[in-house]
Image: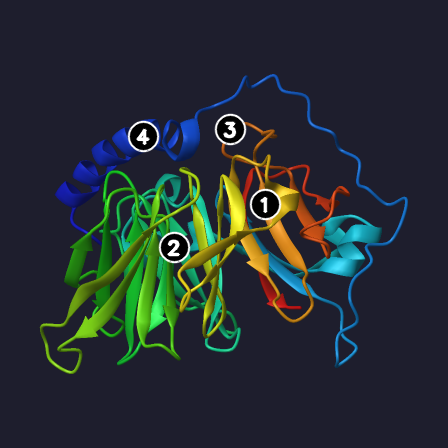
Amino acid sequence: MKSTINNIFNYSALALSLLVTFNTACTSEKDLDTDVIVNETVKSDSEISFNDNEDGTDPSLIFCGDQYIYIIDARKAYSSRYQNAVIESWNAASIADTIGLSENLCKYLTDCKPVNDGKDLLVTSYNGWSILLDLETMDVPFYTINSFGAHSADLLPNDRVAVACANPGNQIQVYDLDTPNKIISSVQISGAQGVAWDADLNLLFAINQESLNSYRLVDWSSNHPSLELVASAPTPKKGMKDLTVVSSNTLCVAGAGSYIYNISDNTFTEMTQFSSSKVLNSMNYNGKTGEVWYTDATVPAGRAIWSTRSLSYSNNVNGSGGASEISISDLDVYAVRVLHW
């Protein structure tokens, strides 16, 4: 699976260009002063008021940043240090040989989406690669190093996967899971940042800075499938960055603020707690309980203006109170996902 020497040289040159782009993309994502002072304390003066789960278990989270992914027990991480609550961890450098890139290119993780009932993760990197990661074996049954600017991915019917590529990729790519690194279909969408499959409606949704698009699958049983645009809805604000499915008729979009989108009514309802937020890189909304876990880089922390040093929680998205936070003091965090509410 290793790439040729020439490909490595070409990819390294491209990576230098991607690094410059990444530091200015997604609402001016550029390096901060490296002398920034990091708060090493954790918030532990009170317990997060989690809503009770039906099975009595504590919520577990997945978060990613730099080249690392961690799965943690959220309640334990809040009352102690997140390092004491780690259930599993993974370093992207471990797949360098598998996907044929140098370890230095296995950085800038942009998502870590659980799929297949939490057994696998779809991991994307702005450095141009995306993988399916088996959480039990840590094997990589699928990868691509052609997804330049990758920000998000989701599984599709017939063992396929869609990858949303922002600048410089600017497209939604489709791959067969059993054929790594070969794009079988694509559709142009400038600055694509989020992608989500709605299995009930049989529609693929994708979001960029200013619009929410839906696509139907065409000739999907053939060797030449394609995506056909069904509708495009302008978002209430520019600067959208994240997209998740809440229910069969409801999506959550976030970036400059956060909104619940009713698909059948084509309406956006603002979650007012986030009206002043400008850089919500990830937002996970539980429609049954009203809880959210999210990352907010509006006031950046760490070494880059796109990063945060905390995972935030709220169970009152239309309230005026502040969020509860789990401090991640040693990592430039990009996204958080919920493995178990």
CA gap, disc 3 and disc 4: 13 Å
What residue is pinned by disc 2? Answer: 152
**How crowded is the residue under tag 4: few (<14 C-alpha within 10 Å), some, or many (20+)?**
some
Q: Relative to residue 143, is residue 329 depicted above or below?
A: above
Q: Secondary structure at mark 3?
A: loop
Q: Position of residue 248 (x, y in %)?
A: 46, 75
Look at label 2 and name its amino acid: Ser
Q: Which mark is residue 295?
A: 1
**Residue at left offset 68%, top offset 50%:** 318
Q: Is residue 11 something one can see in this rendering?
A: yes
**How crowded is the residue under tag 1: few (<14 C-alpha within 10 Å), some, or many (20+)?**
many
Q: Nearer the viewer, residue 274 or 190?
A: 274
Look at label 1 and name its amino acid: Thr
Q: Which mark is residue 260?
A: none
For marks 4 and 1, give the one nearer the viewer. Answer: 1
Q: Nearer the viewer, residue 196 or 15?
A: 196
